[in-house]
Image (cartoon, rainbow, N blue to C red):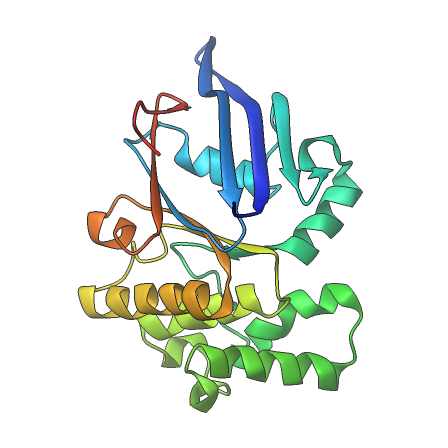
Amino acid sequence: MAEVLIAVRDLARSYERGGQTVHVLDHLSLDVERGAFIALMGPSGSGKTTLLNLLGGLDRADSGAILVGGVDVVGLSEDELAGWRAANVGFIFQLYNLLPVLKAIENVELPLQLFGLPRRERRRRAALALDLVGLAHRQDHYPRELSGGQEQRVAIARALVTDPTFLLADEPTGDLDPHSSKEILDLLQHLNADFGKTIVMVTHGREAAARAKRIVHLEEGRIAAGGV
């Protein structure tokens, strides 16, 4: 049996909208094994991105538990959550969120500043991460000098540079052309298969979902029948 890295238990999240309570996640439970590559699919409003944000500590659950290595993320204070997130989670977004005034290598090393590492060590690790995603030769280029696919590779290098426990990807190919999308999906598969990185990816695309080892369908805040 594979080790369960993330155990989601009875997770609930609701929002007030127009004077009504909208239950985005309805007591959802899910296991994510170490080394998994999971694609979360479902219609708009099914709770995919909300679940991803809760897994990454970007949002707070109303109730339930998210156990990562025995730590219940839901019960952490804001300060504890910030430290946990920096050490454990690598985020990959649809929009790359690179700082235009920084070179690729400077964007990648940004998360390392939270750890108090010397500049030389930060730069060394950032260069390794860029080499891993095939962009060592572009490390001194600014985002405006890169293609969309290259910008997303820089964003993936930034997510990897702290060697996080798992990666969360929210529509990572949603803003890319088919060729660049294929390259990014190839890279994610490579990180999972050859480096054992645990990945949870939200996607609407069947081609992207087909790259995952497991597809989980959400519907109205729950895992759909037969959806795992």
Q: Position of residue 57 (x, y in %)?
A: 62, 41
Which residue is the extreme one toward the bottom? 137
Residue beneath the point at 28% across and 49% down: 209
From this viewpoint, which residue is outermost toward the front?
Answer: 1
Q: Which quadrant holds the C terminus?
A: top left
Task: Inspect this view and state whether residue 34 appears.
Answer: yes
Pick the residue in front: 15 or 134: 134
Total residue callouts: 0
State the residue at coordinates (37%, 69%).
187
Residue 85 lies left or right of residue 52; in this view the side is right
Residue at (71, 40) in percent of width and height: 70
Answer with left or right where residue 97 lies relative to residue 58. left
Does residue 97 sit above or below 227 in this rendering? below
Q: Is residue 80 left or right of residue 64?
A: right
Residue situated in front as seen by the camera: 98 or 9: 9
- Decide if residue 129 is on the left or right side of residue 123: left
User: Farthest top residue?
Assistant: 19
Tell me the residue at 36%/78% (across/down).
146
Q: Is residue 59 above or below residue 27?
A: below
Looking at the picture, does residue 109 appear above or below residue 203?
below
Q: Position of residue 136 (x, y in %)?
A: 47, 87
Q: Is residue 148 visible?
A: no
Query: In the figure, 126 relative to 18: above or below?
Result: below
Give x and y (percent) for residue 43.
27, 31
Q: Nearer the viewer, residue 92 or 210?
A: 210
